[in-house]
Amino acid sequence: MGEEFVKREEFNNLKNDVERIKEEMSENAKTLQSIDKKIDVITERLVSSDKIDELKISPMEKRLTKLEDNQSWLWKAFGTALIGVLVKVVFDVSTHIK
C-alpha cells in the first residue's frame, strides 16, 4: 500500500467544508436554544392560563352548588306543604263524613 498525499487545494476545500459545517452546527444550536426558550414561554403561559381559568371557574362552581342546594330546599318545602294540604283535606273530609 502506497501512501497517498492530499494536495493543498483539496486540503483547503476540506478545511472550508469543515468550517462551513461548524458554522451550520452553531446556527442550529442557536435555533434549538431559541425554540427551547419559546417552548418554555408557551408552557408558562399555558400553566398561567389554566390557573386563571381555575380562579374564574371556582367561584362559579360555588355559586352553582349554592343554587342547587337552594333548589333542593325549595322542592323539599313544596313537598312538605303539599303533604300538609293533603293531610288537612283528609281531616276536613273525615270531619264532614262523621
Image (cartoon, helix red, strand yellow):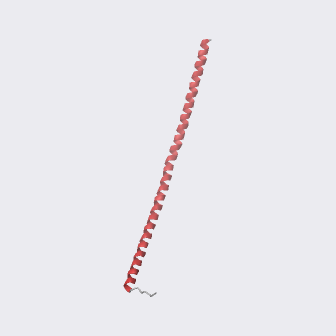
Depth order, front residue of 32/64: 32
Name the residue at 57% across, 31% down.
Answer: 76
Report the residue that reaches farthest toward the bottom. 2
Q: Answer with the quarter of the image where residue 85 lies.
A: top right
Report the residue that reaches farthest toward the front. 1
Name the residue at 38% across, 83% down.
Answer: 10
Question: Residue 63: x, y in percent?
Answer: 52, 41
Q: Is residue 31 left or right of residue 61?
A: left
Question: Residue 67: x, y in percent?
Answer: 52, 38
Above or below: residue 13 compared with residue 78:
below
Q: Is residue 37 left or right of residue 82?
A: left
Depth order, front residue of 82/3: 3
Report the residue that reaches farthest toward the left. 9
- Quarter containing the C terminus: top right
Question: Residue 74: x, y in percent?
Answer: 54, 32
Depth order, front residue of 90/11: 11
Depth order, front residue of 33/96: 33
Name the residue at 53% across, 37% down.
Answer: 68
Count of residue discs: 0
Above or below: residue 60 compared with residue 16:
above
Question: Residue 33: x, y in percent?
Answer: 45, 67
Name the residue at 42% across, 78% down.
Answer: 18
Q: Is residue 16 left or right of residue 51?
A: left
Report the residue that reaches farthest toward the right. 98
Above or below: residue 7 compared with residue 50:
below
